[in-house]
Amino acid sequence: MNILGIETSCDETGVAVVNDRREVLAHLVFSQIKDHQQFGGVVPEIAARAHLDHLDPLIRDTLKEAGLTFSDLDGVAATCGPGLIGGVMVGMMAGKAIAYAAGKPFLAVNHLEAHALTPRLTHDIPFPYIVLLVSGGHTQILVAEKVGHYHLWASTRDDAVGECFDKTAKMMGLPYPGGPNLEKLATRCSDLAKAKTRFPFSIPMQHNKEMVFSFSGLKTAVKNEIDKLQNSDDLPDLAASFQSVIAQTLALRAGQAMEKFKNLYPHHNHPHLIVCGGVAANVSIRTALEMEARHHQFTLAAPPLEYCTDNGAMIAWAGVELLKAGRTASLATKARPRWPLEELKETIYE
Ligand code: KG4
Ligand code: ZN
C-alpha cells in the first residue's frame, strides 16, 4: 500500500510516499524559513503563497524519487487541519485533485493525529500509549487508544511550549525560528548548575497536582531577567536555565501521566511514552524525558529529528493508518483551522 502524503499547515511544504511496511519511499521538505525570517515569525499569507509555488514541483520530485506514478498510489493523504487555513487549503486541494484524477481514496489527515502516529512509523509501538505533543501550537498529553481515539489528559492554559521558546528567543534577539536557535545558544553555557543559580526559574505550577501546563509566567520571568541583563555574554546561561526548567516541567507532567496510565492499564507490559512535535527535537528535553520514563519503567520513543518537525512522511503514514482503519474521506471534506484530537471520534469522513 503506497500513500502520498501532503503537509502544508504551517511553514514547511512536505511531501512523501510511505507504504504499509513502514518504509519511506521518498520524503522531501521545503522549509520557508527564509521567507518568514525578516518578519520574525510565520506570516500566514506568505506561507499560503509559498506552498502554492513549491507544492507541485515537490510532488513531482517526490514521486520521481520514489519511482512511482499516480497510478501506483493506493491513496492520497493531506493535512486538512488544524493549521493556518490558507496553507491547509493549498495542500488539501492538491491532494483532492490528485485523488480525483487518479481515482484513489482521499485521506483527510488531522495534523495532530499525524504527529501522534509518527512513532508507529519509526518504531513498532502498540496501542495504547502516552503522547506528549509539544509543538509551536500545542502542548498536550494524550492517550492514543487506537486510530481516531485519543483522550486528552493535559493541555496548556496559555502559550504552547514551542511558542514560549519562540517568544523567549525573540526577546533574546535570536532570529526565527526561535526554538532551535535558543537550543544552540544554550550549548554555549559551560556550567548549567551555575546558570540555574544565577537565573533561578521555577517550574510553572509545580505544586498544582493537576496535569496542566502554563508557560506565560515563565516567559515574563525570563523577560524580567533580560531587562536586567548588563552583558549579552550572559545570554547562553539564561537560555540554558530557561531550557532546563522547560525540560523539568515536561518531565514532571509526563511522570504524572505515566503513573495514571499504570493505574488505568495495569496489565500493559510494555508501556511507551511518545514525545512528538517540533519541540521534541530539543536534546535536553529528550534527555529529561528519557530519565523520567526509565524511572517509571516506560520506554521513551521519539521519532528521528526529521520526522519531529512538520513533514510529509507523517501525513502519508497517518494516511496508511486511516486507510487501514477504513477512514477514507469525501472530496467535500472541509479545511479546519481548529480540529481538536478529541473530536476525531465524532468526525464523519463520508
Ligand atoms: O511541530 P512543528 O514543526 O510545527 C507546529 O507547530 O505544528 O513545531 C514547531 C515548533 C516551533 O515553535 C519551534 O521553535 C519548535 O517547534 N522547535 C524547537 C526545536 N526545534 C523546533 N524548540 C526547542 N528546541 C528545538 N530544538
Ligand atoms: Zn506540527
Image (tube, rainbow, N blue to C red):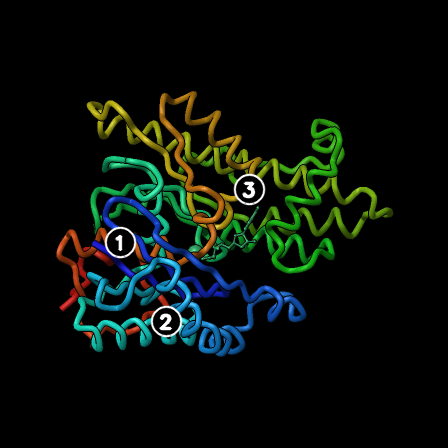
Q: Position of residue 99 (x, y in %)?
A: 23, 72
Which residue has dot 1 on it?
342
Q: From the viewer's perspective, is residue 6 above or below residue 241? A: below
Query: How would you rate the neighbour count of disc 1 (Cα within 10 Å): few for under 14, some for 14-19, many for 20 or more?
Result: some
Residue drawn where x is 45% and y is 77% of the image: 52
Which residue has dot 2 on it?
91
Query: How would you rate the neighbour count of disc 3 (Cα within 10 Å): few for under 14, some for 14-19, many for 20 or more?
Result: some
Q: Position of residue 308 (x, y in %)?
A: 45, 48
Please state which of residues 173 and 68 is positioned toward the viewer in this rendering: 68
Which residue has dot 3 on it?
282
Residue 193 is left or right of residue 6, and the answer is right
Number of labels in the image equals 3
Residue at mark 3: C-beta within 8 A of ligand 1: yes
Q: From the viewer's perspective, is residue 325 above or below residue 73? A: above
Mark nearer the N terminus (3 vs 1): 3
User: Which image quarter: residue 318?
Assistant: bottom left
Please state which of residues 127 and 160 is positioned toward the viewer in this rendering: 127
For marks 1 and 2, give the CA distance. Answer: 23 Å
* Foreground label between 2 and 3: 2
Amino acid found under the numbered disc labelled 2:
Gly
Mark nearer the N terminus (1 vs 2): 2
Figure quadrant of the C terminus: bottom left
Q: Position of residue 141 (x, y in %)?
A: 37, 43
